[in-house]
Image (tube, rainbow, N blue to C red):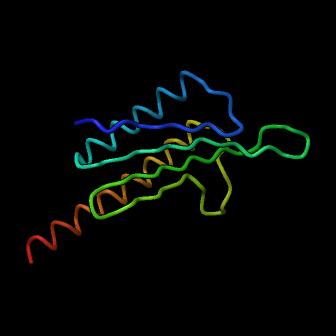
Amino acid sequence: MTTPVTLTFRHIPRSGGLESIARDIGSRLQRLNERMTGCHIVLESSNDASGERGRYVVKIHLSVPGAQIHAESAQPSGEGHREPRSALHAAYENAKRQLEKLRRLHARNAAS
């Protein structure tokens, strides 16, 4: 069963290209945990005082049985990314690490 991916764009015009990448990320995360029951991806941009586009941040919220995973793309400095695709990739990698950690934890608990 495929979990629907919901998308929210904040301060970013909706783009078919970004939407396609985000949906692909949702599908890849679904393959990592087939029991996923929810996937919500938020793409946002901060605007500076002049209205110029600032940095991009992506947040991914996943629901899996027994856990909620919240991953985002913020860099170690706390800043967003210059490109929305970079932010999508960083958030995906963060969510992927968390899903893999959860899988290892469940495997270790099952072996006990």
Q: Looking at the picture, how far across and down is residue 104, in whole percent?
A: 22, 65
72 in relation to 14, above or below = below
User: Is residue 3 shown above or below 60?
Assistant: above
Residue at image location 43% in from the left, 50% down from the top? 93
Quadrant that contains the C terminus: bottom left
Left or right position of 66 against 50:
left
Q: Nearer the viewer, residue 73 or 43?
A: 43
Tell me which corner region of the image, top left, top right, bottom left or bottom right, holds residue 109: bottom left
- Position of 7 relative to 33 (above/below): above
Residue 82 appears left or right of 8: right
- Residue appearing at x 56%, y 44% in the figure: 42
Residue 101, placed above or below residue 24: below
Furthest residue in direction right, as rendered = 50
Where residue 84 sits, quadrant-wise, is top right
Residue in view at x 60 percent, y 24 percent: 15
The quadrant of the rendering that contains the N terminus is top left
* Nearer to the camera, 16 or 94: 16
Residue 74 is situated, as x and y percent measured from the top left of the image, at: 60, 55
Residue pushed farthest top? 16
Q: Which residue is drawn at 68% across and 34% down?
A: 12
Q: How many marks?
A: 0
Quarter occupied by residue 111: bottom left
- Give the percent coordinates (x, y) of residue 32: 26, 47
